[in-house]
Amino acid sequence: MKRAKVLVALSSFSEFSEQPLKAIQKSGYDISLNKLKRRLLENEIVEFAQGCHGIIAGVEPYTASVLSQLTDLKCISRCGAGIDNIDLGIAKKRGIVIKNTPEVVIQPVVELTIAMIFDLIRKLSFFTQKIQSRQWVKAAGFLLAGKKVGIIGLGRIGKKVAEVLKLLDADVYGSDLVPDMHWAEKYRVSIVPTKELLARCDIVTIHVSPAHNDNGFLLGQKELRSMKKGAFLINTARGNLVNENALYELLKNEHLGGAAQDVYSEEPYSGPLCNLENVVLTPHVATLTKESRIQMELEAVNKLLDTLVAL
């Protein structure tokens, strides 16, 4: 009789530690690995996950078509927080348990967000590019202390970003569909509508999930134009939250002072933002630290194994 099998869909799984892989091996499950070393396509997920009871997942697409063809699947354990790449309706109908690791991603995303803010307002990447091209160019930056910083989305990550910014003497504003007023009062965060936040703040950082797109948090041309002249925008949340073409135009004509993005509508990104000097662009690495990656993988494995044992 064949032993139960687990697919590890992540291309970089156990890159920094063998512990997560050994934990699966120790459990007695056979392991199917992503040997392509890239994000799997739908047909590849179906091929590699045939006969699997569990999947350690990344951001590859678990559509209705994919899930309908994986008749043995009992659990998907997402290595990360977002589960918008999974058709949750079909998963529920099929009785497939969905797990994720939301707590692990908080610290690395917060740290990258703060780093991006400092990079933009002190022009760190801009100066590096100039010196690398043998140009000794100086330009004044800005202090973070005293600046009005707006946070769209006050979930786990948004709240932590706000708390760090308050320690750095920023004047913090926030908008959320269901704001935690007790928390806001405790940390002296001003809760305002998104429209007011965009018009008032010197720096705006986005921390909402895709589920909020239909509720006014998507920043299109109108919303971006409404931002304070010279303001900075940071997006470490999701690529489909910002109209990149409108952002490019507003950065090019200097209505906006700068933007930092870790996520894009299409990845790998090679669009017009690459041609600007007032941007900081990173390749979707907000959660990619050695420490957080190891912890994330271990948690995803443990949640998968615990679920399969309980079923």
Image (tube, helix red, strand yellow):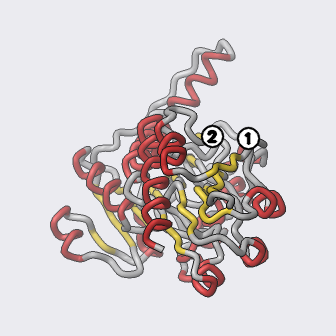
Out of 198 and 105, give the one closest to the viewer: 105
- Residue 117 % position (x, y): 44, 44
Distance between mark 2 and mark 1 Cα atoms:
7 Å
Asked if residue 278 shows in the view, the reply is yes
Outermost residue to the left: 186
Outermost residue to the front: 1
Which residue is found at the position 63% from the left and 21% from the top?
130
Out of 82 and 192, give the one closest to the viewer: 82
- Would residue 248 appear left or right of 15 to someone viewing this image? right
- The number of numbered discs placed on residues in the rendered structure image is 2
- Residue 157 % position (x, y): 38, 58
Q: Amino acid at mark 1?
A: Lys
Which quadrant of the figure has residue 202?
bottom left
**Residue 214 disc label:** none
Q: Residues within 10 Å of mark 1 (few under 14, many from 20)?
A: few
Asked if residue 233 shows in the view, the reply is no
Residue, disc 1 = 37
Which quadrant of the figure has residue 280?
top right
Residue, disc 2 = 12
Work out whether mark 2 precedes mark 1 in sequence or the reverse, and give the earlier one: 2
Q: Pointers 2 and 1 in contact (CB under 8 A)?
A: yes
